[in-house]
Every structure is written in structure tokens, then in C-alpha cells.
Image (cartoon, grey):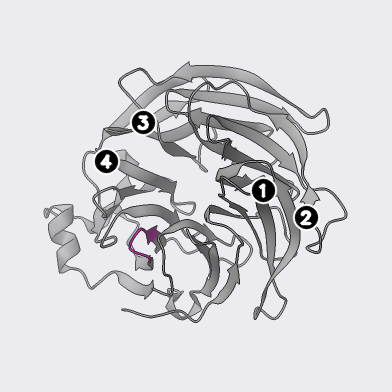
Amino acid sequence: MQGGSSGIGYGLKYQARCISDVKADRDHTSFLTGTLSLKEENEVHLLRLSSGGSELICVGLFSHPNEIWDLASCPFDQRVFSTVFSTGDSYGAAIWQIPEPYGQSNSSTLECVASLDAHVGKINCVLWCPSGKSDQLISMDEQNLVLWSLDCSKRSAEVLSKESAGMRHSLSGGAWNPHDVNSVAATCESSIQFWDLRTMKKVNSIERAHVRNVDYNIKREHIFVTADDESSIHVWDLRKAKVPVQELPGHTHWTWAVRCNPEYEELILSVGTDSAVNLWFASASSEMKTSESSVEASRKRVNPLLNSYTDYEDSVYGLAWSSREPWIFASLSYDGRVVIESVKPFLPRR
């Protein structure tokens, strides 16, 4: 099914790549996004959906010293978030706190809680522990995983452990398993690696070239989704990880990110450099496979593409479901356009 966009838009002043749901905000549907301008002072925007759901309002505008390549909101404190940033010559990562009071009339200065300074090369992402009020987080560069303990009250972050993925592997990103706080998936050029944080050792892997992005299904313990460079999307059952249990067509160009819905286990969103956001219906069960290969089974299914949102003029890089209202998502294109959409018409019947 093809559709344009009936979404609610908001424009950033500069280019941007990353957006995050503010999970800790229980009273509002909120998102954080940051800009990517090398020559200008960058900004972090705190966006909130109005109570009537008809307007996206900037309730906080904050200056950020460098271009933002990754941004993630703290799952237990709505004023705290992480960024990975570049000065043009080097990369850094830090934990920030939004000052109070704040507003959009003037650009407020963020308070730096801690600098994640255990890296030398290019930093790719920061992952927050998805379980409860854990003070642990992970930062990942091209060669290393670093496990941190964060103390916001003391404004400090301590390295708990650090491990190299090896010279043959170049890490590009990852996801923390919401069903097992000791397990993290990391993507690299030739495989998906699964790490046990208790030992900081790789315990398993899926040989898969050029996986760009990964996400866990929050509602199904063993289900895992990948976005591949060649544009396709694969659904995996980690108990039988030799082959995917379902293949989705993905995008006409690179599929950049995938996100499983936090409440409706069959719904997956993807964004790509074809300037589209796609909503998929994906069976999250390995039992759907018979003696057929996953590719053959997928071809015989009804078209899994529920809708394609195409109201963009540039590549779409940022994507986030709302955890508070799981039928709502935010997407972000490189030209700084944020769009809020509702998938209510496509929710599975229960």
C-alpha cells in the first residue's frame, strides 16, 4: 500500500540524522532530536505532541557544541540524554542534563554530566540499559565496547570494563537486549556479534555481511530484526539463527534503520535513503516456516507492506516509536524535517 503523509511536521534549522523517544516522560509524548552542522552552533530540540495530537511543539531548545551523530534519551530520567558528536577532527561522547527551567525562546546551555572519554577512534553509539533504573550504559567505537557506570548526582561515569572486538572487525552499532540485560548485539562488516556483558566476551554471532542496523522485538523474547545494506530487512529467531524466518523487501535504496513496535509485536518500521518510511506487518513467529525457505515463504505471503510514507525530499535517517503512545512514531530526514505519524488505521485486531 502506498500513501503520502498526513503527519505533523516540524522543521529544524540545520541538517540532522538522529531522533529519540523520551521514554521517561510519562505525561507527554516527547522526542529529542539534534542537528548536524559543521559550521554552525548545533541544537538539541525537545519536541512535544500537543494534548489534542494536532501540533508538534518545541518546548526546549538547547545549544550543543558539536555536530550530533547519535542521540539517545535516558530511560529513567527525562532530563538526561547522551550524544555522540564530532568536532570535524575527532569524535566524542557525553551525557547531558537539560537545565530547569527551559523554553524555546532562547537557546539554553546544556549541563554536561559526564564525558565518555575512554575512546580513541570514531565512536558510533551509546546504548542505555533498557531495564529499570540501571546506571549502566555502553559506548561503542569501531574496535571496542566500553561498559560504564553512571552517577548523575556526582556527575561522573566510571569504566567498568572494556573489550576489543578484534582488528578484523569494524563495529558500526548495536542494540541492548531488553529481555537479557547481560546481552548486547553489535553489528560489524561481516556479522552480528552477541556479547555477554558479565565476561565482556563474544558468545555467538550471525555471519551476515553489511548489516546496518538491528533491533529487538520487545514483546517476543527471541525475535530480532536487521536492516541490510542491500536494502532488505530480515526477521530472525535467535534460537534458530542460521537463516532468517522472514525477509521483507525493504527499500529501493539502502535501508538505514529498523524499529520494532514496543506494544504491537507484528509491526516494524523502517527508513531509508530512498526518502521513505515503511510500515511492515511481520509475523514474529518461527513456526510460520515450513519446509520452504524463508525467501520462498515470504513471496507467497500477502504483501507485508502496510503503508509507505513518502512526504520527504531527502534521505530519512532518524526513527523512533513513542513508548507512551505506541501507535505514534517520529521520523527525521537529513534536511531537518521531523514528521509525526499515527499508525492507528493499521493496528492488528486483538
Distance between the alpha carbons at the discs numbered 4 and 2:
50 Å
- As shown in the figure, which amino acid type bears the numbered disc 2? Ser
Q: Is residue 182 visible?
A: no
Q: Is residue 331 above or below residue 75?
A: below
Can residue 119 be found in the magenta stretch? no
Numbered range of the magenta stretch: 271-275
Q: Residue at x 78, y 63 (%)?
A: 104
- Disc 2 target residue: 107
- 10 Å neighbourhood of mark 4: few (<14), some, or many (≥20)? few
Q: Earlier in the sequence, mark 3 or mark 4?
A: 3
Distance between the alpha carbons at the discs numbered 2 and 3:
40 Å
- Disc 4 target residue: 240
Q: Earlier in the sequence, mark 2 or mark 3?
A: 2
Q: Is residue 265 visible?
A: yes
- As shown in the figure, which amino acid type bears the numbered disc 3? Gln
- 10 Å neighbourhood of mark 3: few (<14), some, or many (≥20)? many
Q: Residue at x 71, y 75 (%)?
A: 50
- In the rendered image, the quadrant that contains the N terminus is bottom left
How far across and how far down the image is residue 308, in percent? 36, 73
- As shown in the figure, which amino acid type bears the numbered disc 1? Glu
Q: Is residue 29 above or below residue 112?
A: below
Callout in the foreground (3, 4): 3
Query: In front here: 215 or 5?
Result: 5
- Disc 1 target residue: 41
Q: Residue at x 74, y 46 (%)?
A: 77
Q: Which mark is residue 193?
A: 3
Q: Is residue 139 left or right of residue 237?
A: right
Callout in the foreground (2, 3): 2
Q: Element type at marker 3?
A: strand
